[in-house]
Image: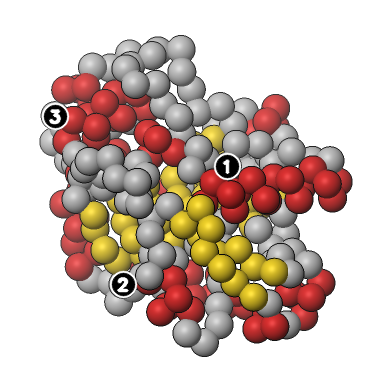
């Protein structure tokens, strides 16, 4: 086990370079203020260094709100607020104090989108967990398909793809006129519930004919899990403790 100072006191931290990348992107990104103590504790529990983008985000900010909050990348937010964006530690149900026996299991949840989609950093044994992809690869749980898909990239490449505008094409068929205004008024613990649901034939044929309403993200993730179980009995596993 590495001590927290070994994870932080390094010669080439990722955060300055990530700030440069953030300043050069045309994608709207809000960097939320972070809590240094929570960031240090999360880094220690994860055993990742500040040399990685994951470590840099967790240590230095409260998270990233991308595209007016359409995508929420988790960090270490300052202060506990009922409507604020939860932190990576909360989302992954990390122990309150360092526990060497704790692990992220099938994968570490690193981001949610407003639709109830989940981005996860694959664990060390995806086959045993019943998930696709390689260890350390980013997976996406798609609420319109009710399943996991491997994105073919690690965390740093995934983040660069987002900042280069990759979300525009990725969500092309799932955005509607006025989506930005609708999303921007949600708080950090809300998502949008669709009726008929996104995975239904009706929504696939005509997204604009669906109705939408804000719901707690925990409710949205629970609906996805229930739908998976009812459709084919397959449990998608941990989607985040939102």
Element at badge 1? loop
Q: Which residue is mark 1?
A: 239
Element at badge 3? loop
User: How many numbered circles are shown?
Assistant: 3
Q: In screen coordinates, is 200 left or right of 59?
A: right
What numbered label is drawn on residue 28? 2
Q: In screen coordinates, is 221 left or right of 85?
A: right
What numbered label is drawn on residue 88? none
Of the image marks 3 and 1, the number of the one nearer the N terminus:
3
What numbered label is drawn on residue 9? 3
Q: Position of residue 177 (x, y in %)?
A: 52, 87
Q: Is residue 154 visible?
A: yes
- Which one is in front in this view, the residue at disc 3 or the one at disc 2? 2
Q: Position of residue 209 (x, y in %)?
A: 70, 83
Q: Are marks 3 and 2 in contact (CB under 8 Å)?
A: no
Residue placed most toward the observer, 205 or 125:
205
Label 2: few (<14), some (14–19) or many (≥20) C-alpha neighbours in 10 Å? some
Q: Residue at x 76, y 50 (%)?
A: 227
Q: Residue at x 84, y 40 (%)?
A: 233
């Amino acid at each position: 086990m590495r001590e927290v100072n070994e994870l932080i006191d390094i010669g080439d931290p990722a955060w300055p370079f990530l700030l440069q990348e953030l300043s050069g992107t045309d994608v709207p990104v809000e960097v939320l203020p972070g809590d240094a103590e929570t960031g240090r504790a999360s880094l220690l529990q994860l055993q990742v260094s500040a040399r990685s983008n994951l470590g840099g985000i967790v240590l230095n900010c409260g998270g990233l709100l991308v595209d007016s909050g359409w995508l929420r990348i988790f960090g270490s937010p300052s202060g506990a607020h009922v409507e604020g964006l939860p932190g990576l530690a909360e989302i992954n149900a990390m122990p309150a104090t360092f526990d060497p026996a704790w692990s992220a299991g099938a994968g570490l949840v690193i981001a949610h989108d407003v639709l109830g989609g989940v981005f996860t950093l694959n664990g060390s044994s995806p086959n045993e967990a019943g998930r696709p992809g390689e260890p350390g690869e980013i997976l996406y749980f798609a609420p319109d398909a009710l399943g996991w898909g491997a994105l073919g990239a690690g965390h740093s490449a995934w983040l660069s793809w987002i900042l280069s505008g990759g979300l525009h094409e990725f969500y092309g068929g799932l955005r509607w006129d006025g989506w930005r205004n609708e999303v921007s008024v949600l708080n950090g613990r809300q998502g949008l519930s669709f009726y008929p649901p996104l995975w239904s034939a009706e929504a696939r044929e005509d997204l604009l004919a669906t109705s939408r309403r804000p719901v707690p993200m925990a409710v949205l993730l629970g609906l996805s899990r229930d739908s998976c179980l009812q459709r084919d009995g397959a449990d998608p596993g941990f989607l985040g403790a939102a």
